[in-house]
Image (spheres, rainbow, N blue to C red):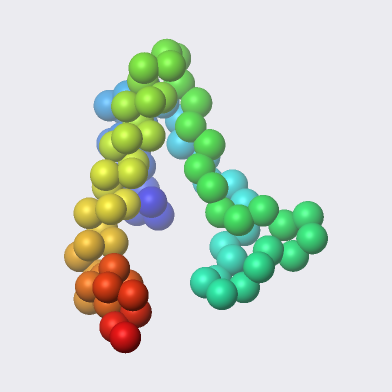
Amino acid sequence: MTQRSVVADIEERYECTITTKGTFVPPGRKPKDGERKLWLQIEGKTQVGVIRCKADIRRTLEEAASMRPDSNARRSGGGK
């Protein structure tokens, strides 16, 4: 969700605001005390808009993850 044009399109479609919060924590590392993993705050005019926005974000992220070259290895248990 870092591509601004994708975020702007989703925000406009559902009349919501998407704000990235937290800190990137690499896989395998636990967050430090007081540190919160990366997360998205979604605010909107209506609850329905927020729910639809969340679903669209999830779908977009899943599509992007499935297009990654290593996505098959992740889903099959790391290629073991």
Residue 23 in picture, x, y percent from top left: 62, 58
Q: Does residue 51 sit above or below 24 in this rendering?
A: above
Q: Residue at x 38, y 51 (%)?
A: 1
Total number of numbered discs in the rendering: 0
Is 2 left, or right, of 35 in this rendering?
left
Q: Residue at x 27, y 47 (%)?
A: 60
Residue 79 in picture, x, y percent from top left: 29, 83
Q: Nearer the viewer, residue 78 or 40?
A: 78
Residue 46 in picture, x, y percent from top left: 42, 13
Is 34 left, or right, of 17 in this rendering?
right
Going by the picture, which residue comes out furthest to the right? 33
Q: Is residue 46 visible?
A: yes
In terms of image quadrants, where is residue 52? top left
Q: Is residue 5 visible?
A: no
Going by the picture, which residue comes out furthest to the bottom? 80
In terms of image quadrants, where is residue 31? bottom right
Q: Does residue 58 sit above or below 44 in this rendering?
A: below
Residue 61 in picture, x, y percent from top left: 31, 52
In terms of image quadrants, where is residue 74? bottom left
Q: Does residue 57 sit above or below 73 in this rendering?
A: above
Q: Does residue 78 sit above or below 5 in this rendering?
A: below
Going by the picture, which residue comes out furthest to the top? 46
Q: Residue at x 28, y 61 (%)?
A: 65
Q: Residue at x 46, y 36 (%)?
A: 18
- Quarter of the C terminus within the rendering: bottom left
